[in-house]
């Protein structure tokens, strides 16, 4: 069993990226600029945004965070996006999700200009990815792909993705299909999940259920990517973060597994930074 160390891979990729950004800066006299819009005070979102700011600074990307009240109207949020779209000093825009219930997320996501949509969640970007003509690929799916690509050739591999979210499962199914994997996109209504998992070379879990995948579900020498970030209380009442896969349970059976934390998370942030640089160059 080998650990698929996303933290280390992201560190190496961030180092390479920072060199490219340095030479861009020398040539054009400016740094790439990421604008993050954070609505409300969701504690997890606050942590994610802090991490993004810190990592952006490390590779030489300027980041600005606009913090809006949880009561901001949809119209005012759309105005902020319109201004960012028109602001030539801004290269990429990210609206942190989830948004409060009174705001229509689809409308907000589609308001971000396709030239600045660093998450790749805009319906046009998702459509282009589905058609195999991607421009910006969503960060978590791209991070999962880069981890897999670092250890194997995806062509002809049987992959099961657990979870059909618009942020992870769906775009990841398009991306891996484009890379010639045979993809099953499973979800809460799927039947025979265990046997679907058992016949898969690669399991990608993105369902938000702590320790859901057990060893009885996993083929010998399978590869596992764990996208889950779940906060649970352990036996002593201490809060800890676990994935969607029961790591200790499956560890003896798998050939590779990405840990939580230290797996997909750092790769997602790397891809946010590399997408920002891509949009900057474009
Ligand atoms: N919330 C959880 N994951 C993400 C992500 O990848 N992008 C944005 N914008 N919000 C998120």
Image (spheres, rainbow, N blue to C red):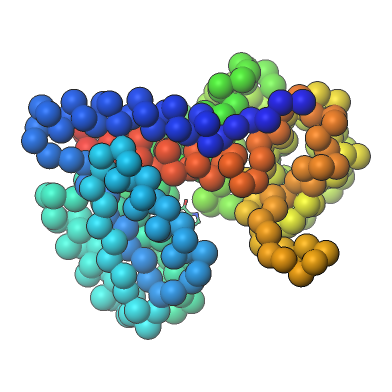
**Would residue 107 appear left or right of 175 to someone viewing this image?**
left
Vertical placement of residue 275 versus 230, above or below: above
Residue 192 to residue 257: above or below:
below
Residue 28 location, quadrant: top left
x, y (%) of residue 125?
38, 43
Which residue: 19% across, 50% down? 90
Answer with the quarter of the image where residue 36 lies. bottom left
Judging depth in this view, the residue of 236 and 173 nearest the camera is: 236
Question: Can see residue 159?
Answer: no
Residue 69 in the image: state x and y as whole percent: 35, 79
Q: In which quarter of the image is the N terminus?
A: top right
Q: Name the residue: 26% across, 52% down.
A: 63
Can you give x and y, in whole percent of width and height, for residue 7 in the image? 53, 36
- Which residue: 84% across, 48% down? 191
Left or right, 118 with respect to 76, comes to: right
Image quarter where the C terminus lies is top left
Return the x and y of residue 139 as percentages of the image width and height. 46, 42
Q: Can residue 210 be seen in this view?
A: yes
- Nearest to the observer: residue 231 or residue 175: 231
Which quadrant would residue 65 be assigned to in this image?
bottom left
Q: Name the outermost residue toward the bottom.
A: 71
Residue shown at the point (37%, 45%) measured from the top left: 55
| 126 or 216, nearer to the observer | 216
Furthest-front residue in view? 236
């Amino acid at each position: 069993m080998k650990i698929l160390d996303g933290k280390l891979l992201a560190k190496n990729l961030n180092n390479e990226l920072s060199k490219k950004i340095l030479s861009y800066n020398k040539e054009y006299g400016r740094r790439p600029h990421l604008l993050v819009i954070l609505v409300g005070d969701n504690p997890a979102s606050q942590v994610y945004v802090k991490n993004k700011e810190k990592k952006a600074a490390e590779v030489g990307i300027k980041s600005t965070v606009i913090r809006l009240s949880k009561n901001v109207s949809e119209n005012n949020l759309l105005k902020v996006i319109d201004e960012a779209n028109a602001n030539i000093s801004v290269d990429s825009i990210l609206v942190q999700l989830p948004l409060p219930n009174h705001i229509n997320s689809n409308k907000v996501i589609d308001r971000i200009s396709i030239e600045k949509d660093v998450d790749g969640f805009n319906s046009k970007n998702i459509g282009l990815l589905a058609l195999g003509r991607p421009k910006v690929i969503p960060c978590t799916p791209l991070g999962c792909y880069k981890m897999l690509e670092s250890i194997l050739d995806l062509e002809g591999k049987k992959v099961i993705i657990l979870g059909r979210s618009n942020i992870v499962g769906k775009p990841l199914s398009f991306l891996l299909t484009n890379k010639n994997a045979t993809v099953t996109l499973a979800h809460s209504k799927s039947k025979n999940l265990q046997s679907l998992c058992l016949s898969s070379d690669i399991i990608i879990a993105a369902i938000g259920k702590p320790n859901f995948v057990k060893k009885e579900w996993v083929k010998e020498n399978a590869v596992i990517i764990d996208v889950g970030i779940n906060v649970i209380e352990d036996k002593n009442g201490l809060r800890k973060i676990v994935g969607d896969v029961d790591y200790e349970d499956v560890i003896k059976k798998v050939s590779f597994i990405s840990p939580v934390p230290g797996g997909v998370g750092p790769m997602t942030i790397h891809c946010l930074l590399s997408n920002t640089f891509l949009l900057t160059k474009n």
